[in-house]
Amino acid sequence: MNASRTTLTTSSTVLLGVVLPAVLGAAGLFVSSIGERGGTVFYAGTFFTAVVYIVTWIFFGDRRTSFERAEPITDILRGALIGLALIAVFVVGALMVRDVEVLSGPVDGLLDNARLGIIWLTVLTTTVNGVGEELFFRNVAVHRLPWSENVSRIASVGLYMLVTASMGVPLLIFAALVIGAVAQYEAKRSGALASSITLHLVWTLGMLLVLPPIIIQ
């Protein structure tokens, strides 16, 4: 009886703490991707996704392993440097694919949110969503998936890619693989999220501000 109850509890936790938020997050990103560039739907869909992730972390996350760290400044600086390095890598990649319409076209549309929208609101939206993604994929999913830590971290990267795919931008799926893998490594290495959140935000804001002049034709 106890084993059955434990199995049921674990299944419920996975469903409510991982699967449902991932589905809702994917739905929010999909809605944001089909709305008018820089319009209300984009902001609403993205904020909705962020709220889903943050609320899920409040109820299902492990707060002790989120921000308890003896040297958070060191982690923040490390994350910032990694984020800057990733910006450089992706800028080089953008230069290589900007004439490949099937790859650059969807990115053009996505970056129109920065070009046509309210820039401070776009920055705020991407920042809140980036924090939400780290709280969910690097903390909640890792602790709530019913496997070993290493397997759960790998699975959470795959889940991150799957949710990101809902936006219909092939290069974002690749970005989710890279950012997800590096962020997971940082989260595991440090035992907290300061480094992974910082690198995610530095990379995201860098792409938002640096990439449009490079890839938008």
Image (spheres, rainbow, N blue to C red):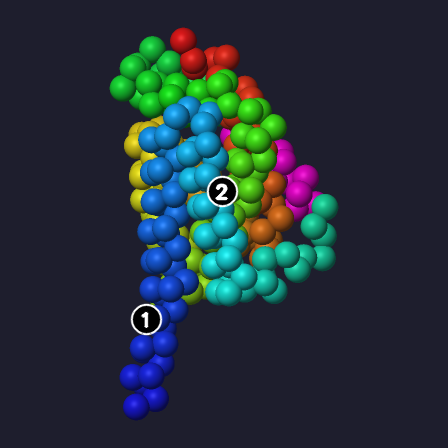
* x then y, percent, for residue 143: 46, 63
Residue 34, image quadrant: top left
Q: Which mark is residue 47?
A: 2
On the question of residue 102 being in view, the answer is yes
Q: Is residue 96 above or below residue 43?
A: above
In which quadrant will I find the N terminus?
bottom left
Query: Residue drawn at (47%, 13%), measured in percent from left and top?
Result: 214
**What amino acid type is highlighted by mark number 1?**
Ser
Circle 2 or circle 1, nearest the eye: 2
Q: Nearer the viewer, residue 51 or 74?
A: 51
**Magenta-tinted stretch:** 74-87
The main secondary structure of the magenta stretch is helix
* x then y, percent, for residue 94: 42, 19
Query: Residue drawn at (39%, 19%), measured in percent from left and top?
Result: 108
78 magenta-colored: yes
Which element is circle 2 on? helix
In which quadrant will I find the C terminus?
top left
* x then y, percent, for residue 177: 39, 39
Which element is circle 1 on? helix
Q: Is residue 125 left or right of residue 105?
A: right
Mark pair 2, 1: CA separation = 28 Å
Q: Which residue is mark 1?
A: 11
Q: Nearer the viewer, residue 21 or 100?
A: 21
* x then y, percent, for residue 47: 49, 42
**What amino acid type is highlighted by mark number 2?**
Phe
The 10 Å Cα crowd at callout 1, few under 14, some 14 to 19, many 20 or more, is some
